[in-house]
């Protein structure tokens, strides 16, 4: 088992999952894209937006960068800026919610913003895995996610970015894998079994066959989704 002591999560993000009002998904996307263009003028970082292509019940997932200090998110000035947008921190009953059937927000800690931004801008296809741990298994689930990143590196694949819960929402952890397209995502199917098995053992698993079953032993809920980037250009 790997230690999580050296695992650094020093940046805060707000994560919002949205399900559009039936028939209004494209209108919601247009609204979000238009608002994202105004973020710089308002002195706000532009959020990362993706649309699911298969799996899970949400239509859109937005990750909004907060910064290295969570308290800055709750200053009067920061709140004023978000409310000046048309999609962030909108008051109850506002026009924004005409486009929303369901919305859930959560604050998480995650990877360095520069690395996240580079990957999101470089790649346009994502593997999103959302996990809710069994009681008492949160730390072990994080260890397992770190182990899987070791495994991915050993088979010459990019590791996943890991995000962990601070407040809100049901998920304890979610991870993002970055790919050019679905063909790039599926390339691991061509890796020889002996290479995968050796990598799994280096990462701390009994074998490549036990990775999935071990992960499942830690989980109450698991949502697995493929998604594509929504750009504002």
Image (cartoon, helix red, strand yellow):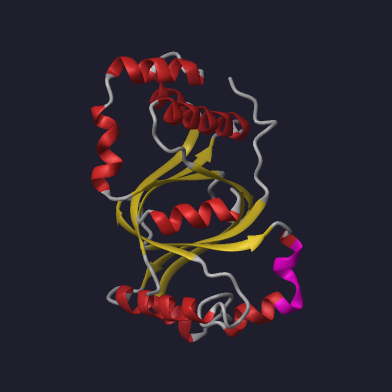
Give the percent coordinates (x, y) of residue 169.
56, 55
Q: Quadrant of the C terminus?
A: bottom left
Residue beneath the point at 60% across and 82% down:
42
Residue toward you, 127 or 122: 122
Residue toward you, 17 or 204: 204
Q: Which residues are magenta?
A: 71-77
Q: Quadrant of the N terminus?
A: top right
Residue beneath the point at 47% across and 66% down:
103
Residue beneath the point at 26% across and 47% down:
182
Residue toward you, 134 or 189: 189
Residue beneath the point at 43% across and 41% down:
222
Give the percent coordinates (x, y) of residue 135.
60, 34
Give the percent coordinates (x, y) of residue 98.
42, 81
Q: Is 177 positioned to the left or the right of 174 in the image?
A: left
Q: Dividing the picture into quarters, in which one does residue 90 lie?
A: bottom right
Instruction: Let me know if residue 18 is in the magenta part.
Output: no
Query: In the figure, 19 relative to 98: above or below?
Result: above
Q: Dividing the picture into quarters, in which one does residue 198 lie?
A: top left
């Amino acid at each position: 088992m790997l230690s999580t002591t050296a695992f650094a999560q020093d940046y805060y993000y707000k994560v919002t999952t949205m399900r559009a009002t039936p028939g209004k998904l494209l209108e919601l996307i247009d609204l979000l894209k238009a608002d994202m263009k105004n973020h710089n003028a308002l002195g706000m970082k532009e959020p990362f937006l993706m649309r699911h292509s298969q799996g899970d019940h949400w239509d859109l997932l937005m990750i909004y960068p907060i910064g290295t200090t969570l308290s800055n998110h709750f200053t009067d000035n920061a709140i004023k800026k978000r409310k000046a947008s048309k999609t962030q921190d909108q008051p109850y009953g506002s026009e924004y919610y005409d486009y929303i059937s369901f919305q859930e927000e959560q604050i998480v800690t995650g990877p360095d913003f520069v690395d996240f931004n580079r990957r999101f801008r470089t790649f346009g296809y994502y593997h999103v895995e959302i996990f809710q741990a069994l009681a008492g298994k949160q730390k072990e689930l994080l260890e397992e996610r770190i182990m899987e990143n070791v495994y991915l590196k050993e088979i010459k694949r990019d590791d996943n970015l890991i995000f962990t819960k601070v407040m809100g929402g049901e998920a304890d952890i979610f991870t993002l894998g970055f790919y050019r397209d679905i063909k790039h995502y599926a390339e691991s199917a061509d890796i020889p079994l002996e290479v995968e098995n050796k990598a799994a053992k280096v990462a701390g698993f009994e074998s490549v066959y036990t990775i999935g079953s071990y992960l499942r032993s830690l989980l109450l809920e698991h949502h697995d989704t493929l998604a594509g980037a929504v750009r504002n250009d």
